[in-house]
Image (cartoon, rainbow, N blue to C red):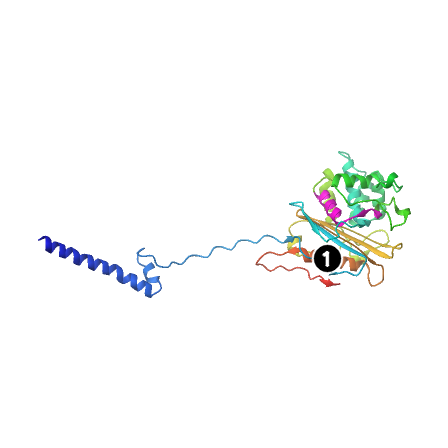
């Protein structure tokens, strides 16, 4: 009986093995789909779902190359990453230009910070607002005097107290009072303060992080975010300051939060140039563009506005894998 039982078991084993091998062979011939349908038998190919796409980071400004075929005496720019504190920019970003009205944001901030828990008079608060929103010279001078500023040159070539505090509080390293080639008569004027793009982005960061204006920081940033008037709306002592960097930013960046700006521009007789500066700051970055170019009819402040916008546009880092509408500003020749 044992040999017969052994033979029966062998036959059964062959039959079972064949039952398993046939569908496996069929599965190989059919690409594996057939085997996958057999209750987990075998190791055929399976349909693996594609991973869900990740959301790209929002656009921002980041260090990168900038190309501007600039027609003028001086051009430079700097960008601060406010998350890391790193500053990048042109090779000459430590060279200086007169600040002009760009400095009005510091003048207002310095005055308000010194008030402590006190409130400014309604008149001075109105003038402070006009100094930023409308770049009003009369308002800036009134606030400057209230902050302790003086047009009288300080001894030993020092800047006046308002500018000295900017240097100390904001950690500025390239900022000085007016000097050659500007005539000596301007040595005590705040608008002739010499500042580099590197220091300008530090100033923007200083205003945004609260060191400059203290408890008035949100108020100052809001005023800067509501600067009004196009480059065509300028008057002798006020108006027309909403242009430049803000025009080079895509809507996706503007939608992330307020962009606080302050520009400065003056046509100076002593060197025959427009002195134009642009400053913009958000919670992520601070950008400054500064320049001097011939004060001819064809090169009005609108030329400087285009240069500032072009720099901003070139520094935009788009969302990876997504369409980003970046304002088309001139690259190269303007």
Q: Secondary structure at mark 1?
A: helix
Horizontal and vertical percent position of residue 292: 81, 56
Could you say which quadrant of the image residue 30 lies in? bottom left
Answer with left or right where residue 27 lies relative to residue 4.
right
Q: Which residues are magenta?
A: 191-208
**Along the line of sight, the residue nearer the viewer: 112 or 310:** 310
Q: Against 43, is 113 above or below?
A: above
The image shows residue 325, relative to residue 128, as above or below, that is below
Measured from the top left, where is residue 293 in percent x and y?
Answer: 82, 58
Query: Going 20% across and 59% down the picture, which residue do you hit?
Result: 14
Kindly identify the residue that appears in the image at 28 percent across and 62 percent down.
23
Taking the image as drawn, is residue 25 in sight?
yes
290 and 210: which one is in front? 290
Image quadrant holding the C terminus, namely bottom right
Give the total number of marks visible in the rendering.
1
Q: Which residue is mark 1?
A: 309
Q: Residue at x 22, y 58 (%)?
A: 16
In the rendered view, does 5 fall on the left or right side of 48?
A: left
Give the x, y percent position of residue 303.
Answer: 78, 60
**Dot 1, how many residues are within 10 Å of its Cα: few (below 14), some (14-19), or many (20+)?**
many
Q: Nearer the viewer, residue 119 or 246?
A: 246
Residue, far left: 1
Q: Is residue 135 visible?
A: no
Residue 193 magenta-drawn? yes
**Which of 137 and 186 lies nearest the eye of the viewer?**
186
Q: Is residue 138 magenta?
A: no
**How would you classify the magenta stretch by its main secondary structure?**
helix
Residue 203: quarter of image: top right
Up the image or down, 162 lies above or below 100; here it is above
């Amino acid at each position: 009986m044992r040999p017969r039982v052994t033979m029966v078991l062998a036959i059964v084993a062959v039959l079972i093995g064949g039952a398993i091998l046939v569908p496996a062979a069929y599965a190989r011939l059919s690409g594996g789909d057939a085997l996958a349908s057999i209750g987990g038998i075998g190791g055929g190919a399976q349909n693996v779902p594609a991973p869900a796409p990740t959301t790209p980071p929002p656009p921002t400004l980041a260090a990168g190359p900038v190309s501007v075929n600039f027609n003028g005496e001086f051009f430079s720019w700097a960008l601060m990453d406010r998350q890391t504190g790193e500053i990048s920019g042109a090779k000459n970003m430590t060279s200086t230009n007169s600040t002009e009205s760009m400095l009005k944001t510091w003048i207002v901030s310095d005055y308000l910070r010194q008030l402590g828990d006190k409130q400014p008079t309604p008149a001075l608060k109105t003038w402070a607002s006009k100094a930023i929103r409308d770049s009003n010279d009369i308002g800036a001078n009134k606030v400057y005097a209230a902050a302790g500023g003086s047009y009288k040159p300080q001894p030993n070539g020092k800047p006046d107290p308002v500018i000295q505090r900017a240097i100390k509080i904001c950690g500025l390293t390239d900022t000085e009072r007016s000097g050659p080639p500007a005539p000596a008569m301007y040595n005590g004027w705040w608008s002739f303060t010499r500042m580099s793009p590197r220091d300008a982005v530090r100033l923007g960061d200083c205003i945004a992080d609260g060191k400059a204006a203290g408890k008035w920081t949100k108020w100052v940033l809001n005023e800067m975010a509501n600067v009004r008037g196009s480059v065509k709306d300028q008057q002798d002592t006020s108006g027309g300051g909403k242009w430049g960097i803000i025009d080079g930013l895509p809507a996706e960046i503007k939608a992330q939060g307020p962009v606080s700006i302050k520009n400065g521009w003056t046509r100076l007789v002593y060197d025959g140039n427009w002195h134009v500066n642009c400053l913009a700051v958000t919670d992520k970055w601070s950008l400054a563009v500064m320049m001097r170019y011939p004060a001819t009819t064809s090169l009005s402040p609108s030329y400087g506005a285009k240069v500032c916008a072009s720099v901003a546009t070139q520094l935009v880092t788009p969302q990876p894998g997504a369409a980003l509408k970046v304002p088309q500003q001139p690259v190269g020749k303007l």
